Image (tube, grey):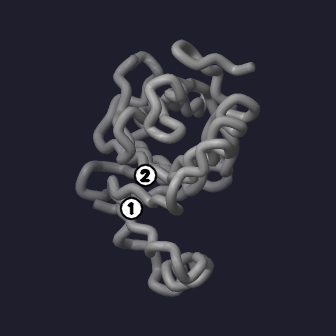
Amino acid sequence: MFFSWRFIPACLLAVSVAALPAQQPTPEYKGVLIKRGAVDVQKCLNVSTSHPGWEITNLAFTTINYNTGGRTGDIRFNAYNPAVETTTACTAENIDMSGGSKLWHDCSVVGTGFQFSLTDYGLKIKGSWSCGGDPARVFNGEGVLSSGILICDDYPFEERGWQTVCQMANGVVEASLSEPATKS
């Protein structure tokens, strides 16, 4: 399949790995959690109540036969939650991207999911996180990223049909919090 992390040139992988501090684990994708260390409970509470959300990077999607009305495809991105200093890999393949589906797709961190629509290129993400494992410090957030497309390339006559691969701009999803925790 074209839409895979396996096809990232080795020089780009070397640069991204070299940019990480020495004590950090090497990032792995396709459902593997990238954790930056123990959660600082006070920092987690401060960030969760003042700026809850996710930083979205490496957002790209593939559509199959888009030029003839196709609306199925694949999507992948990373979502970093600064409150718990954790990055989750989010990937879904062969999904309906028409905007009519209300199906949530799971990310690698349990309790984090997303929806994507080709209609407005909107990425909706929701998740739950805990500051220190205390049930009274659980936050539930949801928000939308509307990002612009940076570039698209067509790959005709691929195995699944004509594929259009698009990269989108990085951005921030500002989450609205719901019960049990609410934004102060």
Q: Which residue appears farthest toward the left when viewing the image?
A: 159
Looking at the picture, does residue 107 appear above or below residue 122?
A: below
Residue contact between numbered discs 2 and 1, judged by CB atoms under 8 Å: yes
| Amino acid type, callout 2 | Ala
Instruction: Report the side of 83 relative to 32 (left or right).
Output: right
Residue 29 is situated, as x and y percent measured from the top left of the image, at: 38, 62
Q: Which residue is mark 1?
A: 29
Residue located 46% across and 32% down the image:
134
> SS class of the residue under badge 1?
loop
Alpha-carbon neighbours of circle 2 within 10 Å: few (<14), some, or many (≥20)?
A: many
Q: Position of residue 160 (x, y in %)?
A: 26, 50
Q: Residue furthest top?
A: 179
Dot label at residue 89: 2
* Quadrant, the N terminus: bottom left
Nearest the eye: 97 or 58: 58
Q: Nearer the viewer, residue 157 or 98?
A: 98
Image quadrant occupied by the C terminus: top right
Looking at the rendered structure, the kind of residue marked 1 is Tyr
What residue sits 70% from the left and 39% below the top? 47
Q: Quadrant of residue 98?
A: top left
